[in-house]
Amino acid sequence: MKIGNVKIHGNLFLAPMADVTNPAFRMLCKKYGAALTCSEMISADAVLYENTRTTSRGISCEEEKPFAIQLFGNSASTIAPAANIIEEKYAPDIIDINFGCPANVLVKDGSGSALLGFPEKIRDIISSVCGKVSVPVTAKMRVLHDMRKTLDIARIIEEAGASAVTVHGRTQAQQYAGKAEHEYARNIKNELSIPVIANGDIDDGFSAKRILEYTGCDGLMIGRAAMGNPYVFMEISHFLHSGEQINTDECAQRLADFKEYVKLLELYGLQEYVDVRMHAQWFTRGIKGGRHIRQGISKARDKNSILQLMESLCMQFPDKSSNSVIHGN
Ligand SMILES: Cc1cc2nc3c(=O)[nH]c(=O)nc-3n(C[C@H](O)[C@H](O)[C@H](O)COP(=O)(O)O)c2cc1C
């Protein structure tokens, strides 16, 4: 698939997630097959006022390419110049604009999903950003109850010059509750010529296959299922290609990934920005005995004690089913 002039090798994208998709985490997802990664959302105002703590979210490296940086704001007059600064400073392959975040602090400010109530503002933002940067511009949107109005917004995004749109099939009011409704992405895909990416509740090979087939979309974006489990990209892409599930020792896999994650955080100098304990909690989600170990992790003093706890978990509950396959006994 191509987004503007950017070649994307694959159809599984990592969703932008604040406090999750830092460069170290994105590199792990890339390693397991995420075709396109995206920064956490960055405030256009923070870029204009040179808030280094926030704009450091744009840091990347050559091996991550292609990658996108996501911006949020409430008007073209801030987002467009911020996009220009971001392009010069961090050289992303794509700039994505947030029309989906339902968080109160953004909505009150007229940013994120609040913009869905003002389609002409969306047009203005996309066309102004396109006029200010040389890389493709994309949009990530939530949906409205009204299908027709949702389709109108998607059409406006395309007309204004966006090169792709991601559709998270939930309304602002839903936040993260209920099920994502993929009929929106399916109808938008039928209407638009630019690539359309479906997002929401894609957490394994089965849901990925079902949603890809149902929507006919060009790609899938995966968010929460990747938190603490970047390997999910490998599992999903394997399933889409072979129809089979990979048999892994989940605990050992998560532990190895967490160790690599900690190394990458050090490599990129991100330790002071990332709450390693919180991330370790995610890496033990869904693992047998994980709940018990998370209590210990929340009290752990440093990364070595976290690693020890995770190691003890894997020794306590070795995954016999997958071991038996690996060793053939
Ligand atoms: C912790 C967290 C942070 C998020 N931050 C962002 C963000 O910065 N920008 C954005 O467009 N969406 C953000 N989202 C929404 C996700 O990108 C995605 O649209 C949503 O989680 C639905 O996909 P999923 O069901 O695969 O998780 C965030 C979601 C979570 C859970």
Image (cartoon, rainbow, N blue to C red):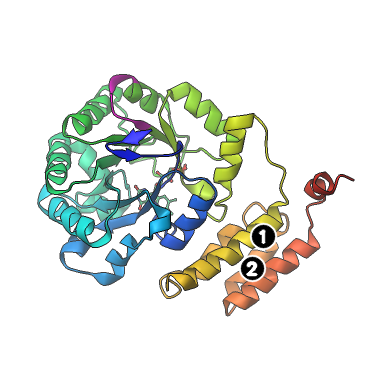
Q: Nearer the viewer, residue 197 or 325?
A: 325
User: Is 71 on the left or on the right of 307, as rendered?
Assistant: left
Picture coordinates of residue 198 (x, y %)? 41, 33
Location of residue 28 with respect to 223 vertically, above or below: below
Location of residue 40 with respect to 12 vertically, above or below: below
Q: Residues within 10 Å of mark 1 (few under 14, many from 20)?
A: some
Disc 1 to disc 2, C-alpha distance: 7 Å
Picture coordinates of residue 71 (x, y %)? 26, 52
Which quarter of the picture shows residue 43? Answer: bottom left
Residue 280 in magenta stretch: no
Q: Which residue is mark 2?
A: 295
Residue 113 visible? The answer is yes
Q: Nearer the viewer, residue 92 or 13?
A: 92
Q: Which residue is mark 1?
A: 291
Q: Residue drawn at (19%, 49%), measured in percent from left and top? A: 110
Magenta segment range?
190-196
Residue 204 visible? The answer is no
Residue 192 in magenta stretch: yes
Q: Residues within 10 Å of mark 2 (few under 14, many from 20)?
A: few
